[in-house]
Image (tube, rainbow, N blue to C red):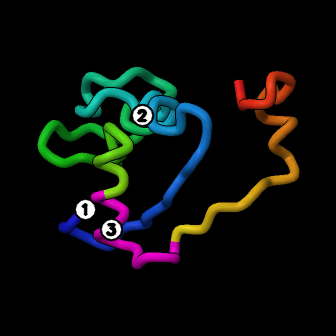
Amino acid sequence: MTSSPVLVLAIRGNSAIAVCRKMMGATFGSNADAGTIRGDFGVSNSFNLIHGSDSAEAAERELGLFFNDGEVLSYDRAVEGWIYDMSGGDPE
């Protein structure tokens, strides 16, 4: 995160950390499955192509490096019912 310009994205959602880490693939590109970001685009075992927080606590700490209080917004999305099963009241 310190060697070149970065694009920082804050994502919130049901199992967001687990879903994003699965899309990223194994830490080293040479070990990552095809179809993941690291598996398709990463080849180095020394440099990490993409970073994702591994816990909610780490996410809070890491987001604080890039965003000030109030810059990460929370809002209700109209498409929520199309993404999650909300029949029980909570996203499933």
Q: Is residue 65 magenta?
A: yes
Tell me the number on the disc at residue 48: none
Most distant residue in the front direction: 89
Residue, disc 3: 64
Label 2 and label 1: CA atoms lie apart by: 16 Å
Which-is-in-front pick, marks 2 and 3?
3
Q: Nearer the viewer, residue 91 or 65?
A: 91
The amino acid beneath tag 3 is Gly
Closest to the observer: 7 or 10? 10
Q: Residues within 10 Å of mark 1 (few under 14, many from 20)?
A: few
In the picture shown, does residue 40 fall above or below 85? below
Mark seen at residue 1: 1
Position of residue 64 measured from the top left corner of the image (x, y, whole percent):
33, 68
Q: Does the segment drawn in magenta span residue 60?
A: no
Horizontal relation, residue 4 to residue 75: left or right: left
Quarter assignment of residue 73 = bottom right
Q: Earlier in the sequence, mark 2 or mark 3?
A: 2
> Which image quarter: residue 1?
bottom left
**Extent of the magenta region:** 61-71
Labels 2 & 1 near each other (Cβ < 8 A): no
Label 3 Cα neighbours within 10 Å, binned few <14 / some 14-19 / many ≥20: few
Residue labelled with disc 2:
21
